[in-house]
């Protein structure tokens, strides 16, 4: 994990515009939003899926950067006053606090554009049709049928209640879509049959849901200092969560069930799935 994180950090550093390149303040905000923080879960999943598919690491770099840039953009926009209105992210002021709201909005826009520039211009797929399909996959994961759609449902649900299937659908879009795209894009950099790709996609759906369940538990139980973002925000804003719907103990049990099923889904991969198994463990057992 440490080796992949370092490799992705270096690749992101190269992909982002330099601070002294005009408009400097915008580029500084983009770099502030991306570099020097975060667990890099989505790049790690892309690399692990690529390893399971026998992909060369050089082909995975643009995929890993693209999914992390989309994730970073989503965090910048999520923190804005018109969304979650948060002041802390990764243990430091959010982008709109450190810079200003307009710069944060533009930085998020520019990071999303850069993600597609990196993916389209990188070595992720030698075949043009495959590469075009990968761009389409990432676009869907970020759009109204993915992350943006999930955020819209989340905002509309504030102060109300959702059923468990409704909550799951929201998070399949809001959190799960980009996680699934990370795995699918990584796998597409190698060579797998349709059945193996389907198993990896099911694995990604499971760990995407598990990630959100654990996030909800941590928001309810961990401190702001531990999380690096404002703790207790979901309850304060009246957001439906797995904890508000199921309680902490049942939410923990659900995360463990999802972890076990994710392991079972990888049974046919043998040693090629070891990194994916380890990441399922990390996602469920993490404490921040």
Image (cartoon, helix red, strand yellow):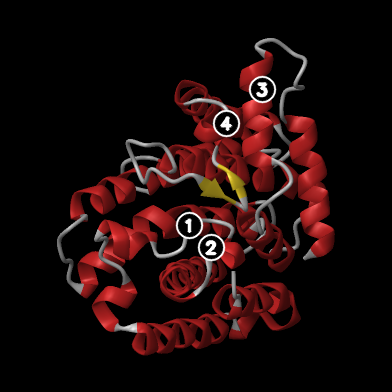
How crowded pointer 4 is (Cα within 10 Å; few <14, some 14-19, many 20+) is rated as many
Residue 156, image x, y percentages: 19, 49
Dot 2 corresponds to which residue?
224
- Pair 3/1: label in front: 1
- Pair 1/4: label in front: 1
How crowded pointer 1 is (Cα within 10 Å; few <14, some 14-19, many 20+) is rated as some
Q: Secondary structure at mark 2?
A: helix
Q: Residue at x 37, y 40 (%)?
A: 143
- Pair 2/3: label in front: 2
- Pair 2/4: label in front: 2
Which label is found at residue 111? 4
Res 199 seen here:
yes
Callouts 1 and 2 close, C-beta under 8 Å = yes
Residue 257, image x, y percentages: 44, 88
Judge by depth and name the residue closer to the eye, 245 or 50. 245
Chain-order first, disc 1 or disc 2: 2
Image quarter where the N terminus lies is bottom right
Alpha carbon separation for disc pair 1 and 4: 24 Å
Residue 177, image x, y percentages: 43, 55
Q: Residue furthest top?
A: 22
Dot 3 corresponds to which residue?
27
Residue 63, image x, y percentages: 65, 45
Judge by depth and name the residue closer to the eye, 247 or 109. 247
Callouts 2 and 4 close, C-beta under 8 Å = no
User: Relative to 188, is 57 on the left or the right?
Assistant: right
Dot 1 corresponds to which residue?
230
């Amino acid at each position: 994990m440490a080796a992949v994180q370092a490799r992705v950090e270096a690749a992101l550093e190269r992909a982002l515009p330099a601070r002294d390149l005009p408009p400097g303040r915008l580029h500084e905000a983009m770099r502030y939003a991306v570099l020097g923080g975060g667990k890099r879960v989505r790049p790690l999943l892309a690399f692990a899926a690529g390893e399971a598919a026998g992909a060369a690491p050089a082909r995975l770099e643009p995929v890993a950067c693209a999914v992390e840039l989309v994730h970073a953009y989503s965090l910048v926009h999520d923190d804005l006053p018109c969304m979650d209105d948060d002041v802390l992210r990764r243990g430091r002021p959010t982008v709109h606090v450190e810079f200003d709201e307009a710069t944060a909005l533009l930085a998020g826009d520019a990071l999303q554009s850069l993600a597609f520039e990196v993916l389209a211009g990188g070595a992720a797929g030698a075949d043009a049709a495959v590469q075009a399909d990968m761009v389409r996959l990432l676009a869907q994961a970020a759009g109204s049928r993915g992350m943006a759609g999930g955020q819209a449902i989340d905002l509309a649900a504030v102060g109300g209640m959702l059923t468990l299937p409704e909550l799951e659908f929201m998070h399949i879009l809001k959190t799960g879509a980009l996680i699934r795209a990370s795995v699918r894009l990584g796998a597409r950099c190698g060579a797998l049959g349709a059945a193996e790709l389907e198993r990896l996609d099911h694995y990604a759906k499971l760990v995407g849901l598990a990630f959100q369940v654990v996030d909800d538990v941590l928001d309810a139980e961990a401190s702001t200092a531990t999380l690096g973002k404002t703790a207790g925000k979901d309850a304060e804003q009246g957001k439906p969560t797995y904890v508000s719907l199921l309680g902490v103990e049942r939410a923990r049990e659900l995360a463990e069930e999802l972890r076990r099923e994710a392991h079972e889904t990888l049974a046919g991969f043998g040693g090629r799935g070891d990194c994916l198994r380890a990441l399922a463990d990390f996602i469920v057992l993490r404490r921040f």
